[in-house]
Image: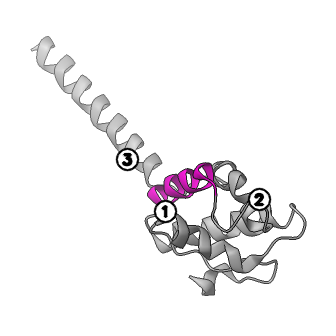
Amino acid sequence: MAVSIKFLAMLVLLMLSALATAETSLLAPSCADVTKAVAPCLDFLKGKGGADPSRACCDGAGELAKETRTKNDRQAVCECLKTALGKVGSYDASRVPLIAKKCNVDINIPPITDQTDCSKAL
């Protein structure tokens, strides 16, 4: 009987742990993760370094795409980008959606400026 109770207690703990892990994986990427992912894209966004984004930029965009599954995720990423890009000085907002296109990444991010309404843009 004691073995059965211990087994059930262990099973409950495992289930709770699995639920907590699943819940965490469903959250949108943090702004720190978004900023880190797109940091290598700054030269491309500023029109420096050629017509194509760097490999590091494409890798970051790919990782970001894997973590943005829902409209809410995309809105959160848009808001993070809006905040981060507002701090980098001048850049070409029309190049933001080109990152996904040129990197062959399945993520829809609009041109982002300080005026972008992320709730309507996606």
Residue 34, given in percent of the width and then of the height, sits at 64, 55
Residue denoted by label 2:
43
Magenta-highlighted residues: 54-68
Visible in this render: residue 95?
Answer: yes
Foreground disc of the pair 3, 2: 2
Mark 2: few/some/many CA within 10 Å (<14, 14-19, 20+): some
Depth check: give the residue in front, 17 or 1. 17
Residue denoted by label 1:
68
Foreground disc of the pair 1, 3: 1
Which corner quadrant holds the C terminus? bottom right
Tell me the kind of residue under disc 1.
Thr
- In three-dimensional space, the C-alpha distance between marks 3 and 2, rounded to whole angstroms, equals 36 Å
Query: On the picture, is 64 further left or further right than 32?
Result: left
For residue 22, the mark is: 3
Secondary structure at badge 2 equals helix
- In three-dimensional space, the C-alpha distance between marks 1 and 3, rounded to whole angstroms, equals 15 Å
Query: On the picture, is 2 further left or further right than 29?
Result: left
What residue is rendered at 67% in x and 72% in y? 96
Query: On the picture, is 98 further left or further right than 39?
Result: left
Among numbered discs 1 and 2, the one appearing first in the sequence: 2
